[in-house]
Amino acid sequence: MRYQRFAVSLTALAALALGLVGAALADDLRTVGDPDSLGFSARRLARITSWFEAQTKTGDPSGFVVGIARGGKLAYLQPTGFEDHDKTIPMRPDSIFRIGSMSKQITSVATMMLVDDGKLELDAPVAKYLPELRDMQVVKTNPATGDAILLELEPARRAMTIRDLLRNTSGLVYASPDYADPGFGNAALHALYGAKAPFRRDKPIASFIASLGTLPLLHQPGEVWEYSVGYDVLGRVIEVVSGQNFDQFLQSRLFGPLHMVDSGFSVPEDKLARLVAVPGAQPRPLSDGDVGKPQTFLSGGGGIVSTVPDFLRFCQMLLNGGELDGVRILKPETVKLMTTNSLPPDMHMAGHEAGPAVGTGWGLGFAIRTNPDFSLIPGAVGSFNWQGSWGTFFSIDPTQKLILVMMMQRSQFSENGFYFNAIRRLPYAALKIPQAPAPVASEQENAGALTEYVGRYVFGGSASSLDRQILVADGNSWTGLESVVVESDGLRVIKPAEGGPAARAGVMAGDLITTIGDRSIKGLTLEAAFRRISGPVNATIKLKIIRERQNDPIVIAFAREAVPSHSVALQVRVADGKLVVEATGAWSILDFDKGEPMPVAFLSKDEFHVESGDHTRIAFIRDAAGKVNGAVLNPGPWEQRGAIAQ
């Protein structure tokens, strides 16, 4: 007995020592480090605070918390605004938020932990663990239109698998008309799910699963990507396989080991003061409702609450390949599998083609960037992210070792993209550019010719070359055809700019542009195709388009318009005998801010730089006739190219 007590004491001491080491390592994600040592411009990083502070004045949302980590260290953690409707309680770094669909990534990690344990088979039928979902039927579709025929059913050609649930290819849909998407099915089936298998906070997941077993699938398993209740089903699978309630499993296997101290399905009474209110509305009666009391329905698809510091730790574990502070959560190869596109090239995700053409795929729980030039995902190829309907967002860039987390609370998710756009742009725009040796300045040639550089230079939609949403600016005019990629037969439209000339004329996502004017663009590079798209303001552009499910090509014509003010742009002018540069679009860029003309000093022919700040270099480029027609910021691997708009 004495030996056993001594052994227990040694175990306790070892655990204490490990805990102290873990606590020391954890400080890297709790204490903000020096931005400069982490590769950020402190001045440009401060723009994030200014931008979000300005948004709090609108009242919806009333506040934000933004966290940024790089290289395993905390670079930025900033609350702005207020937690409550009345704006009396300041937002805190550890304010607690409903994270909505960012619960799915937590559920996917929990699922794969059981796969790593050998207790769950990724390609096993779901019915192996949940017999209620055996022999499910599928609604038939009209072969001519692809529309679902609700009253006609056929057997599933194969059983849905655990992998299908993680990939959103199970055939299930969301149990609410709010999620109905005409591109995938009909609202009637979504409404049927809402009526027959509603989210009931007073019922456990097992009851919900039993209701699902009485309903048909909208798609054959494995054939269509559709956002669905699959992650709620996974929550019940985890309960059956682990023998624990879902919340207990998460606490013992994930939240506890990762020191995610404020994450769970509800907020305890002693922490309620930190729960952020939802402006203008009560929580929707879905899975993420009244989190101020213990939950019965433990929704793996949308019911978890968390904080920015907690979620940074979760993300850092993934970025580290499944480990944090000496605690192994997942095998490295498992994380790699989860963050690699799992969809075939011909499968659609969220209304768009997945795979290399569109640049956005889906792994086992994450949206993933697959294209270096265009994607809905910030960062380099292999970056992954997701978001929640209440206004939460995260992104992980393995190339830059960068984690972005932003949390707010909004009752209407239709406009969340405005804020997600900021958190994807501003941190990348704050990264320090590797300094190239500057040429030794000589006496400026033709000082009187500075006027030839005067003009507005449009750099497209991104404030950083490391996070490109738009490949090439139209230049002299705007068509709204910014989000396109090259295919063998032309340009595939990913998404025309909302409200832009092309969209108003009828150009749609998925259209294939084969001809501009009367000339084929087959085989052209993107740069060459954009030269065809560009032209004088008010000039007509005519496109021949091939559209899915239409036999004959479509011809759409519309007028080019002036480049919109929301583009990233610089205005160059001459003042007091010097060249000055000012940001004029929606975003500041490098050393150039809106409303603050910055003088640039001569370096060499056609090249200037900012003598202070981050020493941004600007090199002007000329066409074959020698006329200035563009500019390059910081020439080199991180360069940004813009075209002059006239």
Image (cartoon, grey):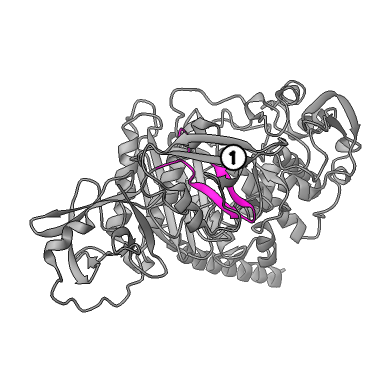
- Outermost residue, left direction? 576
Question: Does the stretch in magenta take in 277?
Answer: no
- Residue extent of the magenta highlight: 478-500
Q: Which residue is the site of mark 1? A: 509
Of 290 and 147, nearer the camera is 147
Of 426 and 555, nearer the camera is 555
Q: Position of residue 127 (x, y in %)?
A: 87, 42
Residue at image coords 48%, 58%: 527
Q: Is residue 45 above or below residue 388?
A: below
Dividing the image into 4 quarters, which one contains the N terminus?
Answer: bottom right
Q: Is residue 46 visible?
A: yes
- Left or right: 507 in relation to 427: right
- Left or right: 570 in relation to 203: left
Q: Secondary structure at mark 1?
A: loop
Q: Is residue 330 visible?
A: no
Of 64 and 587, nearer the camera is 587
Q: Position of residue 197 (x, y in %)?
A: 75, 26
Residue at image coords 69%, 66%: 333
- Left or right: 5 in relation to 132: left
Residue at image coords 48%, 22%: 281
Count the labels in the image. Answer: 1
Q: Position of residue 201 (x, y in %)?
A: 66, 27
- Left or right: 481 in relation to 355: left
Task: Categorize mark 1 by other alpha carbons within 10 Å: few (<14), some (14-19), many (20+).
Answer: some
The quadrant holding residue 562 is: top left
Q: Is residue 58 above or below residue 615?
A: above
Q: Position of residue 6 (x, y in %)?
A: 65, 71
The quadrant holding residue 240 is: top right
Question: Does the stretch in magenta take in 498?
Answer: yes
Amino acid at dot 1: Ala
